Amino acid sequence: MKVLVIGGAGYIGSHVARRLLDSGHTVTVFDNLSSGLRINLFPGAAFIHGDILRYEQLRAAMRETGAQAAVYLAAFKAVGESMVKPEKYSVNNIIGTIHLLNAACETGLKNIIFSSSAAVYGEPKYLPIDEKHPTNPENYYGFTKLEIEKFLGWYDRLKGIRCAILRYFNAAGYDVDGRIKGLEQNPANLIPAIMEAACGMRRELQIFGSDYDTPDGTCIRDYIHVSDLAAAHVLALDYVSGNDKSLTVNLGSETGSSVTEVLETARRVTGREIPAKITGRRAGDPARLTASAALARDLLGWKARYSDMETLIRTSWAAYHTN
Ligand code: UFG
């Protein structure tokens, strides 16, 4: 299938583009390179340097490539920043997706794979979180994701555009075959922060709170390998195009790891000391988040293969160590 990967030069986008190519799809990456990197582009994929906020550019890209499907991975995703600069998130995430949907209507593109987030759920009412869990985002980033999910639902009903909504838990790791070279710029997430501390790119890891109601006092999250996420995108594309039907699924490993456990695994795998300091809690962090991925298993036949902490750290370290 001809697939437009919007944001395909970014961290998750490049892994998805790689996996689509490996599965025999014809891929065009559409990216404004604001955080995506040229080094993440593959010779097997075409590239259009374009911006999702420039409606004509996006529509032209769909027309010129004859895209039958689009994967949308061009959103801003820093939770903290979204609370300070909601305008930025409104324009890029919400208006960007409306452009995508309208351009799809105009060009006859029928399948969209959308990166949503566990942030749509907010503070967990029960664990593990399944797709029936109430949605009540506690940050503006999560709010934009939930609003977009609603737009997608309406365009499904009104325009027959089928959509896979993939609610990621904590994406981490690098391509298991080491083919992605570009490192995320100014990462705020835990595993890249640990990697930067391990390489001396930052002085130390700050551990945001050790007084949570968890066995070691640090927050527990469900880390899911990007190679597993990428595989899910390809399966989701097969599902929506093959069944002419939309779906919403969680993507997580169904395993919880605390900040201390992640750090200790990183120290062991890298053989580095990795300086760390406990600081105060970060606002808005729930103590525990873990996914139920049963629905993705049932509908897509998907299962996390690379999301054990050892592999998450080993592949991250391979990327940081060599690049
Ligand atoms: N943490 C630290 N130090 C750091 C960075 C993070 O201690 O330098 C801690 C956080 O406090 C948290 C855990 O590590 O307890 C994970 O934090 P991340 O920032 O890596 O990830 P979040 O769980 O906050 O959020 C991530 C994505 C969101 C997504 C969410 C879904 O960034 O987009 O997972 O679970 F919505």
Image: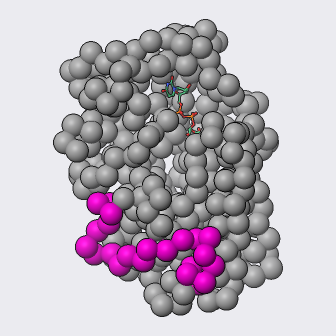
Q: Which residues are magenta?
A: 38-59
Quadrant of residue 322 in the image?
top left
Residue 6 visible to an observer of this rendering: yes
Image height check: is 131 above or below 63? above
Q: Residue at x 54, y 61 (%)?
A: 74
Image height check: is 315 above or below 258? below
Q: Residue at x 73, y 31 (%)?
A: 123
Q: Is residue 163 magenta?
A: no
Residue 299 visible to an observer of this rendering: no
Residue 175: x %, y % from top left: 31, 50
Relative placement, left or right, of 311 versus 318 is right
Quadrant of residue 286 in the image?
top right
Q: Is residue 58 magenta?
A: yes
Question: How many numbered circles are shown?
Answer: 0
Residue 120: x %, y % from top left: 71, 45
Relative placement, left or right, of 154 versus 169 is right
Residue sitting nearer the eye, 307 or 10: 10
Residue 309: x %, y % from top left: 37, 31
Ligand 1 image-quadrant field: top right
Residue sitting nearer the eye, 267 or 134: 267
Q: Residue at x 60, y 84 (%)?
A: 56
Relative placement, left or right, of 279 versus 26 is right
Residue sitting nearer the eye, 315 or 143: 143
Image height check: is 239 above or below 61? above
Quarter that holds the N terminus = bottom left
The scheme the figure's colours follow is one colour
Relative placement, left or right, of 293 versus 28 is right
Residue 240: x %, y % from top left: 59, 72
